[in-house]
Amino acid sequence: MSMTIRVSTILSLRGILADRPGVLGDLVICVFGVGAALALRLALSPWIEGAQFITFFPAVILVTLFCGTWPGLVAIGLSVLAATQVLHGGEVSLAQANAVVLFVIVATMDVSIISAMLAANAAQKASSQRIGELNASLRRSEAKFRNLIETAPDAMVIADKDDRIVIFNAQAEHMFGYARAELIGQSIAVLLPERFRQPHAGKVAAFLASPGLRRMGEGADIFGRRKDGTEFPVESNLSLLPGEDNDLVCAAIRDITARRESRELQKLLIRELNHRVKNTLASVQSIVHQTLKTAGSPEAFSEALTARLAALSQSHDVLTRSDWSGADVREIVAEQLRPYGSGSACRFSVTGPDVKLQPNRAVTLGMVLGELATNAAKYGALSNRGRVAVRWRRRSELGAPRLRLLWLERGGPCLAVPTQRGFGTRLIERSLVGLGGAARLRFGSRGVACRLDFPLLETET
């Protein structure tokens, strides 16, 4: 089987014609070449007696050279046929038969030699083409590698075994503030603060002794150094890039400043959440205790407790929308009145300047306004077709800023002054005392009026 393949490979060798005409074209060329050789041999017959194949050798050689091995062999056969049938009229003597055998042997050797040359030429062309393909593939791979390095989201710094930088990508330029031309050939230690340079050399030596993907900086404090001298926390992944003459160390460096700040903020938020939960639970405990003391029945207790917890929840909703950075008085008022709007905005009048209170003070004011709104819905202006006006203003007392807020009900039922002070009244008064201010409630024929007055912090003015 292998011999058949070899013979098939030899016979399939092509000549030097760039565009072969195909099998039929090869046969035409063979016939034409042998015919030309025969015509030349006939023209030279008066001067040539014994060398009947002298003009057929060039024909065989040229056909093989231009068309390939099997056309050359066909040319040999056609040459023998032409010589015996035309030159000798079909009658071949022993001497002529010996000449035919000699011609076939020599011509076959010529075809073999030319075929070997064609094979060598084809192999050279294939090798050149393969080398070109490999070079093109190498250039594409190099371009892809450089594009990968340049577009990497991390700073990529590649150094040789002597710790000299050979590649420095765009993200590294941005991170460290150096142009790559400034660092190529420089020691990678220039990117580290002085105190990290000696430990870094030891870690790199340990890495080269036992190469493998290694993460540096995770769980430890490792810093990079920018061109301007500022330091920033980093983590780095080291990997080895093997080479024939020199192994390269690739460091993928990531700035973890934002991550650290996020962790610190997360810790702060957890502490703040813990503090606020404790305060909220204390507030709920106080509300339940005081409501239970003043409620006349389980139904009254449930109704009052639900309303007060709703006021507390609504105050938290306002603060949540601002990430607990504080809440504007206008938002606090609107949130407490929202459950009683029912699409009739004309029942409320809300006016005043923008004043943003600190979170705890915003919750307190929300609880007070929630108590006033609940009482107005049960007994006051919001229990019928009355209206509520809320207005506030800044004022100054002894040079200190204060906020005065008025709650005015109009159009509600006439309310007599209560003979007992309930939890709602005490909540309003005590809450304002907690803010360093005071609350004044007035009941009259035109409705309830409440004036709240308390100092503002420096950050609230």
Image (tube, rainbow, N blue to C red):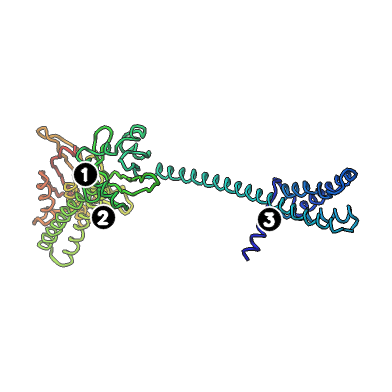
Q: In the image, what residue type sits under mark 1?
A: Pro
Q: Nearer the viewer, residue 270 or 107?
A: 107
Residue 384's tag is: 2
> Pointers 2 and 3 in contact (CB under 8 A)?
no
Q: Which residue is mark 3?
A: 12
Quadrant assignment for the N terminus: bottom right
Residue depicted at x 22% and y 55%: 313
Q: Is residue 117 above or below residue 93?
A: above
Q: Nearer the viewer, mark 2 or mark 1?
A: 1
Q: Position of residue 231 (x, y in %)?
A: 23, 38
Question: Label 1: how many residues lie within 10 Å, few (<14), some (14-19) or many (20+)?
Answer: few
Q: Position of residue 403 (x, y in %)?
A: 16, 40
Quadrant assignment for the C terminus: top left
Q: Which residue is mark 1?
A: 199
Q: Distance from label 1 to label 3 (Cα)?
A: 67 Å
Question: Label 2: how many residues lie within 10 Å, few (<14), some (14-19) or many (20+)?
Answer: some
